């Protein structure tokens, strides 16, 4: 009887170990996919940052151009 209880307990532990091992294998796959996603997101963010820098430069140039083209006329100084 004691041997049967011991064998049952051992079987339960082995089942738990198999289950945990399977979960670890799945988790490793999830983490590998997450690493790939993180790399892609990092690259995208870097591209967005570079694009934003160019947009800010273009905006500053346009503001300067508009200020020159559309400056208010001052009375008597155009002659």
Image: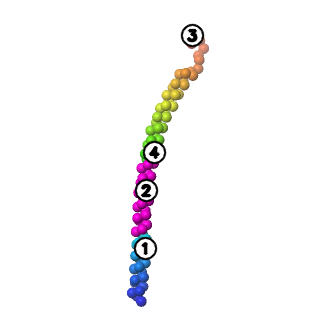
Question: What span is colored magenta in the figure?
Answer: 21-41
Disc 2 to disc 1, C-alpha distance: 26 Å
> In this view, which residue lies farthest toward the right?
75
Q: Nearer the viewer, residue 58 or 29?
A: 29
Dot 4 corresponds to which residue?
Answer: 44
- Residue 54 in the image: x percent, y percent? 46, 34
Give the mark toward the camera: 2 or 1: 2
- Of callouts 4 and 3, which one flags the residue occurring earlier in the amino acid sequence? 4
Dot 2 corresponds to which residue?
Answer: 33
- Considering the numbered disc 2 on the image, is that residue within a helix, a strand or a loop? helix
The image quadrant of residue 21 is bottom left
Rate crowding at label 3 as few (under 14), some (14 to 19) or many (20 or more) other CA atoms within 10 Å.
few
Dot 1 corresponds to which residue?
Answer: 16
Which quadrant of the rendered structure holds the C terminus?
A: top right
Disc 4 to disc 1, C-alpha distance: 41 Å
Q: Are marks 3 and 1 in contact (CB under 8 Å)?
A: no
- Residue 77 in the image: x percent, y percent? 57, 12
Give the mark toward the camera: 4 or 3: 4
- Residue 23 in the image: x percent, y percent? 43, 66
Disc 2 to disc 3, C-alpha distance: 71 Å
- Of callouts 2 and 3, which one flags the residue occurring earlier in the amino acid sequence? 2
Q: Are marks 2 and 1 in contact (CB under 8 Å)?
A: no
- Of callouts 2 and 4, which one flags the residue occurring earlier in the amino acid sequence? 2
Residue drawn 53% across the image and 22% down it? 68
- Relative to 8, residue 56 above or below: above
Magenta stretch: includes residue 33:
yes
- Considering the numbered disc 4 on the image, is that residue within a helix, a strand or a loop? helix
- Residue 31 in the image: x percent, y percent? 42, 58
Residue drawn 44% across the image and 55% down it? 34
Residue drawn 41% across the image and 72% down it? 18
């Amino acid at each position: 009887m004691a041997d049967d209880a011991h064998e049952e307990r051992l079987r339960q532990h082995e089942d738990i170990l198999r289950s945990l091992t399977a979960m670890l294998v799945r988790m490793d796959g999830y983490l590998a996919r997450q690493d790939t996603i993180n790399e892609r997101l990092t690259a995208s963010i870097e591209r967005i940052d570079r694009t934003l820098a160019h947009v800010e430069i273009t905006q500053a140039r346009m503001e300067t151009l508009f200020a020159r083209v559309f400056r208010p006329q001052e009375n008597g100084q155009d002659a």
